[in-house]
Structure formats: C-alpha cells, structure tokens
Image (cartoon, grey):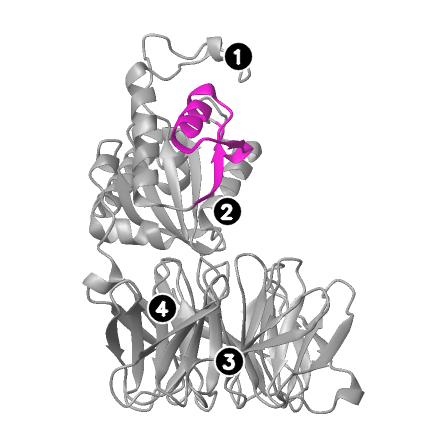
Amino acid sequence: MLSSRTLVGALVAALAVTLVAGASAAAGPDLTRSLRSGGLVVVLRHAATDFTRPDQDPVVVADCATQRNLSAQGRADARAIGRGVRRLGLRIGKVLSSPFCRTLETARLAFGRATVHPALLNTIVAEHDARWRKQIRDAKRLLGTRPAAGSLTVLVTHGIVVQETTGQSLVEGEAIVFRPLGQSRFRVVGRVTPREWGTLRRPASLGATRPRVREYPVPPGTHPHDVAPAPDGTVWYTAQHTGKLGRLDPETGRTTEVPLGDGSSPHGVIVGPDGAAWVTDSGLNAIVRVDQGTSAVRVFRLPAATGYTNLNTATFDRRGVLWFTGQNGFYGRLNPKTGAMRVFRAPGGAGPYGITTTPKGDVWYASLAGSHIARIDVRTGKATVVRPPTAGQGARRVWSDSRGRIWVSEWNAGKVGRYDPATRRWREWRVPGPAQVYAVYVDDKDAVWLTDFGRSGLWRFTPATARFTRVPLRAGADVRQLLGRPGEVWGAESGTDRLVVVRG
C-alpha cells in the first residue's frame, strides 16, 4: 500500500501535467471568436480578496462579516470583466454562483446577476465523504452541460472547487473556458485573467476576413434538405430520401437518425419554443414533432379533406403557434398545445414555399409558382399578397431581418429582393454570375446569406455596401436551405450528402 506522502506526490505530479495542458490555451483572437460563438462554460474564480480578514471558523454563509471578502482591487477587476464582456458583445445565459459573499459580489459586479448553486460551494474544509463526492459530480455535470445556442454559461466559484473538479488551478479573478461535451465531459478552450479582458477585441467582421468552411458527411443517399441548429449544439437535418430526421454532433462528426414512419419524405425542420424539432413532412402530409431528449415521434396529420398539400416549411409565431406552407396552394396553422389545426387555400393558388416570422410577430410566406410574397394575419388566417417589381421572379424563400424587412430569394430572376412593410417599398439586387438563388437567411448581424445552385456555393451580401462575397463549395453541392446561430451559418448539401457550416 502506498503511503499518504506518496499518494500526495503522485497527485501533485498528475495535476502538474494537467495544468501544463490547460495553460497552453491562452486569451487571444481564437478564444474571442469562440466566446462570441457561444456554447461554452466560463468558470470564474472570485476576484481578488482581502487576505487580512480571513474566513472565520466556522463561516456563516449568510453573514459576510464571517468571510474573506473582495478587496477594492477585486471589485475593480470584477467591473473590468463586465466591461470586457459587454464590449465583446457576449451573450451571457445562466450565471451560477457559490453562496459565499465574495463569489456573489464578483458575479453581480461583472454580470449584474447571480443564482446560487450548491455545487459551487467552497469545499476547502469539506470532508472527502459521500456528500463531497456528490458535490463534485454535480459540478462536473454543470461543466459538461451545453448552454443555449449562442450563449455562455458562467460559473463563479472558488479555486479549490475548480481544482477538485477539473484539475486546473486559477488565481483570483481568472477564468477558464470549457467546451461542454455532455455527460459531465468537457475540454479546455482557453483562459482569461482580469487584465486580459481589457485586451480582447471583437474579431473583424466576416465580410473582412476569410470565412472558415467545414463539411460533415451524412449517410449516403440521405439527400439532406433543411437544417436546424439545436440549443444543445447539435444540428438537426431532414433526410428527405430516407424518411428520417438526422442529428449531427459537430464535436464528434457523428450522426444519429430517427425514422419518421412509412412513406415519410421530410422537407423542412425548425426548432420550436419547446426545444423539439418540428418537421414539415410532404410524404406523410403531416407535421411531425421529434422530442429533443427522447427522440419520441408525434405525428399531426392534416385533415383528410385537404388532400395532398406538398408541405414545405414552417415557422412559429410569438404565441407559439406553428404556421406552415404547402406548395400545392395551401398554408396552415397548428396549435401544439391542443393539436388544433386549420388549413387555408392560398390566394393565387400553387406556390407557397418559404415562411418567416418578423421580430414583431408578423408571418410572411413566399410563393414560388406565384412569384409573390404574402402576409398572414395571425388572428384571422387571411393572407394578403404583395407583388415584387420583377414579374415571374420565383420567390422561393423569405427571411426577416431585425427591422422586420422581408428578404426574398428570387429563384427565376437570380436576384435577392427586400420588401419593407413600413414603407411598402421594394429593392432588388442581381447576384453575380449565372445565379439560381435557392434560399435566403439573415444572421444576427443582419448580413444576408444566399445559396446558389448556379455556381455551387453561398453568397454573403452586405446591404450597406451592396457587396457580395462568395463562399465556393464543391460542384453539385446544391445547398437547399440555410439556418444559423451567432458566428455560424449552416446549410444542407443535398447533392453531396453533406452538411456545411461557415464560421468567421
């Protein structure tokens, strides 16, 4: 049996190796881009404290007078962290903290809020018993849990908790950034000291830098049609030719698929307010819900009297009602809470295809065969047609920007159009080359993205400068649809059985 001194020596040696590996990832442009993309957990040791007033024995957690508290420098460091976070435009989700006064004050000064979590409690005097082991397991679970898409989870705790949970060592006020991998697993992305928060800068816009493109293969014969990034970091895709809904884990490149039923031919997929995947299935003539946790499938069939609608795409309005289009001349709505469904005949007949919801809650769809867009009154269900200046342009997909303006991909005309409901004015721009513009998506920076069958690639359009930036892809990629989250734009390469992401 090893002596306690030998065991301690072995632990220190192992920890030293871990620290060297963790320390290699420092603050810099790559870390800034990762933070702005979200999906990470930031573990922050409380800011600098006044060591002339140590914790009393015992500490009363509710009484700051019994604890070592932040010094003037610590409060200044916490505020500096907050300024850095705001300057970088980081999306902060949950802020969890130890109940100690120094951790709560750090969290509130830096992030403006904090929720106490027992897994982050100081363990400096804890016995290494069953209770301690449970706390460490709970802390690891927090580190391995992916935050909501595009956001960061912040954990404010003590150096000993970080050390016992991750093997990493932090000075006061230092943060270590982890990428959660699920099931209490995580890996180090980088570190930031209080001083370094002031040196981190926003990366240049994607239009000024070379975008990074990565492709992920999906099972052969899948013919992926639409994609939808999920809150947990995975990406849903519709396997149109095999009647399944697929899910890609970008961390591992692995895919899993959920069969949707005999005769299924899924077209569109979006993530609903409930976190589930909602599919417009033209083969089943139904809306299909796939649970994010259990993968349970629930089918909402359209009324038999409607006939075949050729379902295309869907969107949720601000009330949580699902609206959908059918290219055979229909649009409709489904109340997920009650299952109530109603289908409407579209003015102008065949063509309803893409659909979108504006920030104010208005719902608009595009008619490919009808070459127009239409606004749906979400109260009455009535659709009002708005015709573009170019006749026969083939409005295929639509997307709203942050101002509620409707962007349109013009398949027949090779243009991108924009309609402003506030002024009732149109503008159109011709896409370079022999373009066939299939889809349009407006990202969180109001940059406009297009898919192009004509030159097999994507376009990023900057409205302020009318500049098109091309992202070339392999021949025959045939990207049918785009969706994204902050820092990422995802597409489905239907022609090559791949998903593609553009990061920048």
Please, is residue 32 above or below residue 292 in the view? above
Q: Nearer the viewer, mark 3 or mark 2?
A: 3
Q: Which mark is residue 116?
A: none
Separation of disc 3 and disc 4 at Cα?
21 Å
Q: Which image quarter is the C terminus in?
A: bottom left
Please, is residue 235 above or below residue 62 in the view? below
Amino acid marked by disc 3 = Arg
Mark 3 / mark 2, whichever is N-terminal: 2
Separation of disc 1 and disc 4 at Cα?
53 Å
The 10 Å Cα crowd at callout 1, few under 14, some 14 to 19, many 20 or more, is: few
Label 3's element?
Answer: loop
Separation of disc 3 and disc 2 at Cα?
53 Å
Label 1's element?
Answer: loop
Separation of disc 2 and disc 1 at Cα?
29 Å
Mark 2 highlights which residue? Answer: 141
- Residue occupying image coordinates x 57% and y 35%: 130
Residue 378 in percent (x, y) is at 67, 66
Pointers 1 and 4 in contact (CB under 8 A)?
no
Mark 2 / mark 1, whichever is N-terminal: 1
Mark 1 highlights which residue? Answer: 63
Q: Nearer the viewer, residue 14 or 301?
A: 301
Mark 3 / mark 4, whichever is N-terminal: 3
Mark 3 highlights which residue? Answer: 387
Q: Nearer the viewer, mark 3 or mark 4?
A: 3
Label 2's element?
Answer: helix
